[in-house]
Image (cartoon, helix red, strand yellow):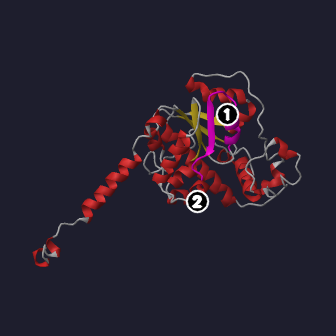
Amino acid sequence: MKPSDRLPLRFRPPLHVPYRRLCCALQHLRRHAAAPEPLRQKTLLFVVCEPRTGSNLLISYLNQLDGIRLEGELLHVNRFRDIHFSPSTARAELDRQLLALDGDIVGCKLMIHQLEHAQLGFSELKQRYPQARFVLLYRQSLIDQFISSRLARQTKQYQQHVVDRSAPGTAPELSFRSTRDQLSYHCGLQRRRYRWAFRALGPATALLSYEELVADPVAAVNLVLLSFGREVDRLGSSALVKQQTRDPREVLLNYDELIGDPNHPSLWLAPPFGSRSGKRQRGSPPTRNQRRSAR
């Protein structure tokens, strides 16, 4: 075609409009595509939680049972150091790791903040893995979770085994001070994230607290196995032990000044995790402005 035969620029069709529509359509297909066929034939179990809620302890108990194999944080950012992190790579990595697990019931731990970072909603997970079961694990005492999180970040130690108790210097007795804004932000953020997860997963989701898990591990595991038609009579002792065993007033130096009434409802978490509903769409993670409003 000669240059003189080309249409003038103002008469050419706007190609960017169909291209954008095509990209949006392909993105929608990728997000709502079904999992690979071998993965859809497996029975999946996801432990949905936040840090310092006893998820490692629950997984250690479940892995003691025959035919159950659960992994840790498959969406942790350290797993994506060598590849570009995006929702598509997060879905592909999740499929790849789950396919590599052997067992009648396989699964992993899904942190709510990691799902938010990966831009994966619970509605998408339920559509991608229709045969999956979900367990929502939370901690009733938000002040204990706040103290445990601060200590874990300072010591860089997120798990402790029985053999670590005898090793000197493995659990340094640190103390710190905090502000009321930091505590309020933590409590508000946890309540908003769990409210989103609870509403998106639905009332059929198994609800389990850290306090119930520690008090009666057998009953907690049977609650998880109820949807699979299984039951256990006893469990072996876990190799994991509680890291924070000191009095909270020894760890948080301004505890009395900061907390006031430890039984105040704002310091405790329980279903349905709040009464006010946000303006975001059901099944979508909290937005940045909504997270900032918790401060």
Image quadrant in which the C terminus is located: bottom right
- Residue 65: percent from the left, percent from the top? 67, 28
Q: Is residue 216 above or below residue 146?
A: above
The residue depicted at 61 percent of the width and 56 percent of the height is 78
The residue depicted at 57 percent of the width and 31 percent of the height is 105
Residue 187 seen anywhere in this rendered image of the structure:
yes
Q: Which residue is labeled 2 in the image? A: 81
The quadrant holding residue 2 is: bottom left
The residue depicted at 84 percent of the width and 52 percent of the height is 170
Number of other residues with Cα within 10 Å of mark 2, as a class: few under 14, some 14 to 19, many 20 or more: few
Image quadrant in which the N terminus is located: bottom left
Give left or right: position of 283 versus 106: left
- Residue 254: percent from the left, percent from the top? 79, 58
Q: Which residue is labeled 1 in the image? A: 63
Ranked by sequence position, the earlier of labels 1 and 2 is 1
- Which range of residues does the magenta coloring cover? 53-76
Depth check, front residue: 74 or 180:
74
Q: Is residue 8 above or below residue 136?
A: below
Q: Secondary structure at mark 2?
A: loop
Q: Secondary structure at mark 1?
A: loop
* C-alpha distance separating marks 1 and 2: 28 Å
Give left or right: position of 51 versus 35: right
The quadrant holding residue 34 is: top left
Judge whether residue 59 is colored magenta.
Answer: yes
In the rendered image, the residue lying farthest to the bottom is: 4
- Tell me the kind of residue under disc 1: Asn
Q: Is residue 51 above or below residue 212?
A: below
Disc ID at residue 79 = none
